[in-house]
Image: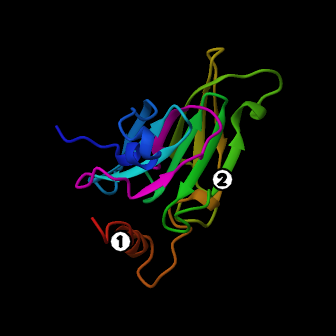
Amino acid sequence: PRAYGGERSARGPGDKDAPGPAVTALACCPHAKDLFLCGREDGSVSLYHLDSEWPLVRYPSLLPGPTVGLGWAPHRPGLWWAHDSASRLVAMDLVTDIHAPALEADLGALRSGPAEVTCVALCPALTRPPGSKYADPALAVGFADGSAELHALGDRFGAGTGHKGPAGPAAAWERCLESLTAFV
């Protein structure tokens, strides 16, 4: 097996042999088979390439609580999300901005009254707006009380948006991958 988790060495001279925060969530990229996300109990998330134990990108305090869920958008290359135990969701779009979140939300605030979020999934298509060739994606949210809700995200996170360039989304994703893996 190959080990990943080079973050251990980044903590300080006295802590180099100390274990890192526990891994609490993993997600393999459906659009680039050699990339995966690793979420940890300290709210950090790292993006790895299979050929390197060191992360390509590390988001040290992406979430205030432990990362409990990670996922890639099946409909849009480079778009991924993470959520924590306090129902906070962050979405990142690697194609448009590798460092800044595309969306930050408190999922518990979607309901009136207390609501513990237990799971989240991005659905590629909920509805197709009239005149659009792309369907709007939805956020599916599961709650501890046994209920689930679908929330339309609109075209901001649709398959055809966020990708500039002469050849469209595929070319933008390829440029992003070249940039991310230049030093692997």
Instruction: Assess whether residue 71 is covered by the magenta stretch.
Output: yes
The quarter holding residue 131 reads: bottom right
Circle 2 crowding by C-alpha within 10 Å: few under 14, some 14–19, many from 20: few
User: Percent position (x, y) of residue 105?
Assistant: 70, 44
Outermost residue, right direction? 112
* Amino acid at dot 1: Glu
Magenta range: 50-73
> Looking at the image, can residue 136 be seen?
no
Is residue 78 placed above or below 38 in the rendered structure?
A: below
Check residue 142 in the rendering and tell me which mark sits there, or answer none: none
* Amino acid at dot 2: Leu
Are the residues flagged by discs 2 and 1 in contact, CB closer than 8 Å? no
Judging by the rendered image, the residue that carries numbered circle 2 is: 103
SS type, badge 1? helix
In the rendered view of the protein, which quadrant contains the N terminus?
top left
Circle 1 crowding by C-alpha within 10 Å: few under 14, some 14–19, many from 20: some
Judging by the rendered image, the residue that carries numbered circle 1 is: 174
The quarter holding residue 117 reads: top right
